[in-house]
Amino acid sequence: MDNAQNLVDLLKVIFSATELRKFEHENGTIAPIELKLDDSIIMISNSTGNTAISTMLHIHVPDVFKTFNLVMDNGCEIIEQLVNKPGDPDIRGAFMDFAGNYWAVSTQTNQ
């Protein structure tokens, strides 16, 4: 993606992401970085002259309400407000970050 460090900073705020390993290109851009979000590990990097690629991710979080408040406080675009649909054991919502990545977040309920 373009400006991967901005996304890293956002993920640290929203998901309390921690850096595991980071590699850099000679120009100082990220190539790649491993981030731990709860029990999941993702890798991102800066685009290298090609068109940046966005993606769709789904992650379970301990408190989807807290996460969604952080999402809104940090200027992400809300795609789907939090909802618990009949028959769905999750409360879920969706947002888009500034880089165009679609995130679905949810917390399991005890239904």
Image (tube, rainbow, N blue to C red):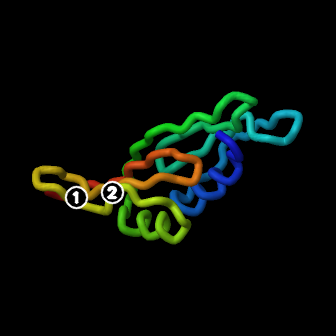
Please name the amino acid that badge 2 sits on.
Answer: Glu
Quarter of the image with the N terminus is: top right
Q: Nearer the viewer, residue 36 or 79?
A: 79
Side (left or right) of 11 relative to 3? left
Report the residue at 71% width, 38% height from top: 46
Label 1: which residue?
109
Give the side of residue 10 with respect to residue 48, left or right.
left
Q: Residue at x 17, y 50 (%)?
A: 88
Depth check: give the residue in front, 96 or 28: 96
Q: CA distance from mark 2 to mark 1?
A: 18 Å
Residue 96's tag is: none
Quarter holding residue 23: top right
Residue 34 image offset from top left, x and y in percent:
63, 40
Residue located at (60% from left, 58% from top): 10
First along the sequence among labels 2 and 1: 2
SS type, badge 1 = loop
What x and y, as percent, mark residue 80?
Answer: 33, 57
Find residue 83 and report its horizontal and vertical position in percent: 24, 61
Label 1 is placed on what type of residue?
Thr
Q: Is residue 51 above or below residue 107?
A: above
What is the residue that sits farthest to the right in this orientation? 26
Residue with the most extreme left position:
87
Q: Nearer the viewer, residue 90 or 82?
A: 82
- Quarter where residue 85 is shown: bottom left
Q: Nearer the viewer, mark 2 or mark 1?
A: 2
Secondary structure, mark 2, is strand
Q: Which residue is mark 2?
A: 80
Judge the density around disc 2: few (<14), some (14-19), many (≥20) Cα neighbours within 10 Å.
few
Q: Residue at x 75, y 40 (%)?
A: 30
Q: Determine whether 10 is above or below 73 in the image.
A: above
On the image, the x and y values in percent for residue 90 come to: 24, 53
